[in-house]
Amino acid sequence: MLETLTLRPSELRDLVAVDALLARSYPRLLRPDYPPSVMVTAVPLIAKARPALLTSGTYHLAEMAGEVVGAGGWTRAGPGRADVRHLVCDDRRVRQGIGRALMARILAEAGAAGVRELACQATRTAVPFYQAMGFEVLGAIEVPLRPGIVFPAVLMRRDI
């Protein structure tokens, strides 16, 4: 029997569930594309839910049978522009349409809000997914997390 995927806006009460999803999935999904030094220093910092993002109204959870199996959203970045934020899929459920469903919601909402260009700071692991969703690679970047700690990422964009 196929489980039904549902999407809903996140709330502050979802902090523990999103933290658990990020803490479990990011290390497993990113390991093939990042050196141990990044896995030890940077990944624990990015694998944390952001309370302000959870209550923004533009961040969503994907659930199956009451379990959070994905999350992602967007925030404004200027007139007509927005950024994809913290898109993640449960590492045990990749390639099941969860990321695609979240991205469809992001594109629809952002487009309805007047956004015409969507950017993201993709993990190296996620570049093929974003390319399949119509994003183009702009180049490698380093995202500063704390003094002396950066996360290597890929800047990408697409028109809506």
Image: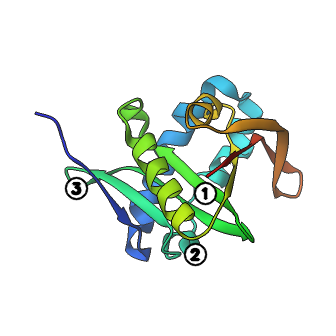
Query: Quick one: SS at disc 3?
Result: loop
Q: Nearer the viewer, residue 34 or 121?
A: 121
Three-letter residue code for mark 2 = Ala
Above-or-below relation of 157 to 130:
below
Three-letter residue code for mark 1 = Arg
Q: Are marks 1 and 3 in contact (CB under 8 Å)?
A: no
Q: Position of residue 97 (x, y in %)?
A: 37, 37
Does residue 42 appear in the picture of this structure?
Answer: yes
Q: CA distance from mark 1 to mark 3?
A: 23 Å
Residue named by callout 2? 52
Whichever of callouts 3 and 2 sits on the residue coming sooner in the sequence is 2
Q: Position of residue 73 (x, y in %)?
A: 53, 59
Residue 85: assigned label: 1
Q: Nearer the viewer, residue 79 or 90?
A: 79
Query: Quick check: 65 left or right of 142?
Result: left
Q: Position of residue 144 (x, y in %)?
A: 83, 54
Residue 66: assigned label: 3
